[in-house]
Image (cartoon, rainbow, N blue to C red):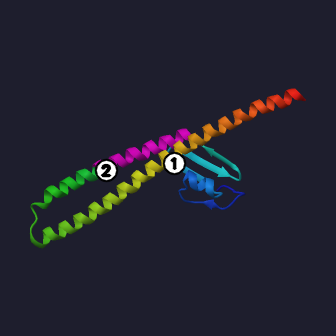
Amino acid sequence: MVDCASGPVVERSVTCAEYIQGCYCIVSISSCGVMAMAAGEKFQIDLEALVGSAAHVNGQGEDLASAHLSSDNRIAAAQSGWVGSSAAALSTRTATWLETSRRLLTRVGEHALNMNNDGIEFSAMERDNVEKLRAVQPAANRAARSV
């Protein structure tokens, strides 16, 4: 548990934009280790872990899509042997399974995309911060020389 001076610990996924807009204290753990941790005013991102996690989720999504497609094909092939009320029941159940599968695959894909986009946003933010620090350094050097 992280003691967060700026607010309560949030136990849900929070996007980069949500973090920037609200003062969240985030602890997010992925299969690659701690991805992000914020306490008070400090915020650190392990971009390598975030990128690795996004790739892992994407790969899992692709495996899941492939497995679901294979199952869908086997069900479709089996439907021709069913007749009457059994065929109608299988058809109804199949439609439900397909919709559930579509929703699940969409959620996994969106999760992978959000992780990837967060990595891009954090990387861009890091580049902007480096540029700001570089812009401050010449001014600090001039001030030191004038003293």
The type of residue carrying mark 1 is Ser
Q: CA distance from mark 2 to mark 1?
A: 21 Å
Q: Quadrant of the C terminus?
A: top right
Q: Quadrant of the N terminus?
A: bottom right
Q: Which residue lies under the disc numbered 1?
A: 30
Vertical placement of 117 versus 146: above or below? below
- The residue segment tinted magenta is 47-66
Residue for point 50% across, 41% down: 51
Residue for point 63% across, 45% down: 44
The type of residue carrying mark 2 is Ala
Residue for point 71% across, 51% down: 41
Residue 126, image x, y percentages: 61, 39
Please tell me in which quadrant of the rendered image residue 6 appears. Answer: bottom right
Q: What secondary structure is found at the residue carrying circle 1?
A: strand
Q: Which residue lies under the disc numbered 2?
A: 65
Which residue of the protein is positioned furthest toward the bottom in this rendering? 85
